Image: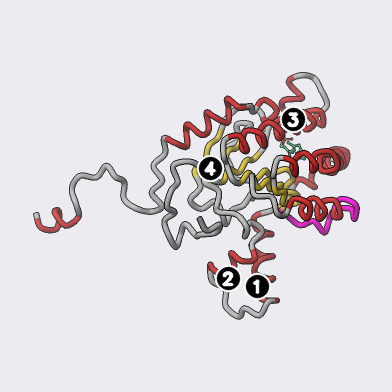
């Protein structure tokens, strides 16, 4: 199956099970607050839920998992929290990439990495290099990522590469998720019902699943629930629903 097709240009073939799941991992702070713990401990517990979700995906043949770990607007948080999140990202790469590699997981990062320390940038690059040829799950972490930044960046890259006119095809080559199919399912935990500048270009025909479960509590059962909700959706991609009984031709002739 080709990796990248466009849902606005062609209808994907088999969408009964999601190939690509994207997750906005929200609710770490509230999880900690409910327990009278500092917010950062919610993020630490959030990392455990990340591990569970990665395992779930490779056990359930989901090909792509994309996680929103740090948005371009998250720099607005207190400095200690930002530092903790970046340190947690660095530590998890240092400690987990070997295990990801052993499990045939390909690691990718999307977002503007130029704002990170040289050490973190090198670690990201090395993690991508080591796991590059793996053929199992592609795990993508969005860090310092913003959907609008992605589109503007892709446009600038297209211009720098000599494209004088922007089309869907041209732009999608330069977008951060150019290696992945558009997400079939977006899960957002934590009860908020918004996209928050996530992969806005790629989400146009994604099925959205919002849950009140706070991210550290998101487990295998919650993931199955989301997949069940997905399986009940009729993905029409702009077509009429299958339930209509009278054809337009019949109405015109009546
Ligand atoms: C949103 O919850 C969560 C984040 C901004 C950070 C997500 C990070 C992790 C799950 C851990 C690290 C992950 C990786 C991939 C290394 P929030 O803090 O906004 O929660 P709140 O809405 O309850 O305050």
Name the residue beneath numbered marker 4: 185
Mark linked to residue 158 = 1
CA gap, disc 1 and disc 4: 28 Å
Q: Which residues are magenta?
A: 110-120
Against 95, residue 141 (above or below) is: below
Mark linked to residue 170 = 2
Q: Quadrant of ligand 1?
A: top right
Which residue appears at 75% of the width and 49% of the height? 143
CA gap, disc 4 and disc 2: 25 Å
Residue density around tag 4, few if under 14, some if 14–19, many if 20 or more, within 10 Å: many
Check contact, mark 1 vs mark 2: CB within 8 A: yes
In front of the other: 101 or 198:
101
Where is residue 30 shown, x and y percent of the image? 72, 27
CA gap, disc 1 and disc 2: 7 Å
CA gap, disc 1 and disc 3: 38 Å
Q: Label 4's element? A: strand
State whether residue 199 appears in this view.
Answer: yes
């Amino acid at each position: 199956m080709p990796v990248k097709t466009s849902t606005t240009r062609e209808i994907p073939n088999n969408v009964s099970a999601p190939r690509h799941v994207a997750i906005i991992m929200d609710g770490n702070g509230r999880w900690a607050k409910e327990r009278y713990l500092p917010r950062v401990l919610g993020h630490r517990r959030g990392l455990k839920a990340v591990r569970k979700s990665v395992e779930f995906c490779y056990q359930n043949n989901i090909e792509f998992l994309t996680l929103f770990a740090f948005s371009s607007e998250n720099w607005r948080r207190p400095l200690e929290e930002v530092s903790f999140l970046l340190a947690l990202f660095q530590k998890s790469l240092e400690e987990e990439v070997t295990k990801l590699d052993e499990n045939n997981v390909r690691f990718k990062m999307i977002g503007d990495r130029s704002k990170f320390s040289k050490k973190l940038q090198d670690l990201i690059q090395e993690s991508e290099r080591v796991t590059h040829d793996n053929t199992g799950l592609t795990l993508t972490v969005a860090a310092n990522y913003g959907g609008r930044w992605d589109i503007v960046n892709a446009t600038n890259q297209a211009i720098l590469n000599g494209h004088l006119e922007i089309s869907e095809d041209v732009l999608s080559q330069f977008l951060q998720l150019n290696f992945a199919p558009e997400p079939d399912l977006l899960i957002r935990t934590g009860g908020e019902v918004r996209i928050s500048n996530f992969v806005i270009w790629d989400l146009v025909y994604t099925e959205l699943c919002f849950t009140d479960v706070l991210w550290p509590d998101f487990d295998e059962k919650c993931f199955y629930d989301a997949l069940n909700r997905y399986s009940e959706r009729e993905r029409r991609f702009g077509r009429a629903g299958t339930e209509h009984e009278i054809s337009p031709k019949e109405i015109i002739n009546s």
